[in-house]
Amino acid sequence: MPLIKSADAPTFQAPLMTAVGLAAPSRGSTENSVWRFTLEAGSPGHAHAVSREEIFIALSGQARVAIDGDTHDFTAGDALIIPAHTVFHLSVPGDEPFEAVAVLPVGAYAQAPGGDRVSPPWAQ
């Protein structure tokens, strides 16, 4: 059973986001990828869908999720389940960062409407 120490987990930078890769095939998992991420205050996010169900657990701050024509606030302690192939948009309208943990099955990909399929590096 691999143990990924927080200090040893790889960190990935993207515009207005930092992801820390916790579990992924490159770190010994075979079924799920898990990462902790921080979205910076004011992050507009971007619309995309994933090919498999994705689960988010909010740790701190507040985000806003738009999905299926509805908008919801997403705060510490909340869980968000995104069905496969459902376009959603996660943004941080406030003035403090938002931190969460995400779980996505191995092999899943993300895709912006009309865009190419992308496998996030923190999930590989």
Image (spheres, helix red, strand yellow):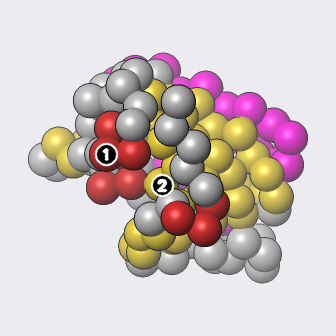
User: Which numbered mark, 1 or 2, is in the foreground of this view?
Assistant: 1
Residue found at the very far left of the displayed protein: 116
Q: Amino acid at mark 2?
A: Gly
Residue found at the very far right of the displayed protein: 77
Q: Which residues are magenta?
A: 69-92
Front in this rendered view, residue 30 or 13: 30
Magenta-span inclusion, residue 12: no
Q: Amino acid at mark 1?
A: Ser
- Residue drawn at x 21%, y 47% is 118
Q: In the rendered image, which residue does mark 2 sit on?
A: 21
Q: Secondary structure at mark 1?
A: helix
Contact flag, marks 1 and 2 (Cβ < 8 Å) = yes
- Please state if 30 lies on the left or on the right of 44 as rendered: left
Instruction: Provide residue 91's location: percent of width, then percent of height.
Output: 59, 59
Q: Is residue 116 above or below residue 6?
A: above
Q: Is residue 44 above or below residue 63?
A: below
Magenta-span inclusion, residue 78: yes
Q: Determine the CA span between mark 1 and mark 2.
A: 10 Å
Instruction: Provide residue 35's location: percent of width, then percent of height.
Output: 53, 49
Q: In the rendered image, which residue does mark 1 sit on?
A: 26
- Residue drawn at x 78%, y 79% is 95
Residue 57 visible in image: yes
Q: Secondary structure at mark 2?
A: strand
Q: Which quadrant is home to the C terminus? A: top left
**Quick one: label 1, few (<14), some, or many (20+) residues within 10 Å?**
few
Instruction: Provide residue 22's location: percent of width, then percent of height.
Output: 53, 49
- Residue drawn at x 57%, y 43% is 3
Front in this rendered view, residue 122 or 5: 5
The circle on residue 51 is none
Residue 19 visible in image: no
Instruction: Provide residue 57's location: percent of width, then percent of height.
Output: 71, 39
